[in-house]
Image (tube, rainbow, N blue to C red):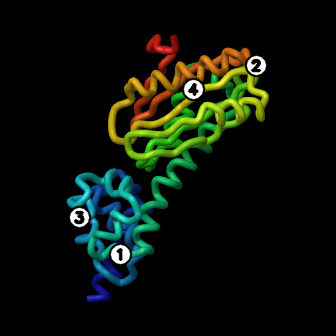
Amino acid sequence: MQDLHHEHRQRMKKRFIKEGYHNFAQHELLELLLYYAIPQKDTNGLAHQLIRHFGSFSNVFDASFEELKKVKGIGDHSAILIKLIPALSSVYLEDMNQDGLPLDTTEKTGKYMIPKFVGVTNEQFYLLCLDTNCRLLACELLFEGTINAVPVNIRKIVEMVVRYNAASIILAHNHPQGFALPSSDDLNTTLSVKKALSAMNIQLVDHIIVAKNDFVSLKDSGLLG
């Protein structure tokens, strides 16, 4: 039986090298990934089980470490390997976007921010500090909350703006469980930050809300006040 598993694994690996991932089914890609955490066992059934349990291929990678380990056959090594995929994808996409261009359009800002939320299951709040030419001075993860809320401390935002001597800023956060549409809390927070910064003659350029591969700009939506 081990010889059969070994031969099957070798065929799968050679197929991937020759054909790439395009002709693989989703469960086959997951099966192939699990080879590197589960030696000498059939991982095809486990790949199917993971997708059934979480409802989709992407949901497997969005599941938490603890949720993954509740699936029979998934231990620490497998859960870590699975969680590495969205983490590596995020770093890969961020690195591709580090092209030195100023964040002077909504499209550039949205493209820059989307990778930062890959695989993130709780709301996170970022502050982007810009110079007078809209070039990025710093992008700081300031706050992290739950799946549908994140507490925001305006004083900390002001402290970071002063630290980087920013001429303007952009706010960004994610909606991991919904659409990229601002809630009333999002709007109130944005206007409170804008009011605090206006006293310092610092411009709030935009507030970007990200959900999966989509984003909404409060500036473009006419909601910055």
Q: Earlier in the sequence, mark 1 or mark 2?
A: 1
Q: Residue 153: where, in percent of width, then height?
A: 58, 36
Inspect the image, locate mark 3, and give the three-letter code of the amino acid beneath it. Answer: His
* Closer to viewer: mark 4 or mark 1: 4
Q: Earlier in the sequence, mark 3 or mark 4?
A: 3
Residue that numbered label 1 is attached to: 9
Q: Residues within 10 Å of mark 3 (few under 14, many from 20)?
A: some
Q: How far apart are marks 3 and 4 (CA)?
A: 38 Å
Q: Earlier in the sequence, mark 4 or mark 1?
A: 1
Residue sitting at x 73%, y 15%: 201
Q: Residue 149: where, in percent of width, then height?
A: 42, 39
Residues at marks 4 and 1 touching, judged by CB atoms closer than 8 Å:
no
* Residue 93 appears left or right of 197: left
Residue that numbered label 2 is attached to: 132
Q: What element carries label 3?
A: helix
Residue sitting at x 70%, y 36%: 138
Residue that numbered label 4 is attached to: 108
Residue that numbered label 3 is attached to: 48
In terms of depth relative to the viewer, which is nearer, 222 or 54? 222
Q: Distance between the residues labelled 4 and 2?
A: 17 Å
Q: How far apart are marks 4 and 1 (CA)?
A: 42 Å
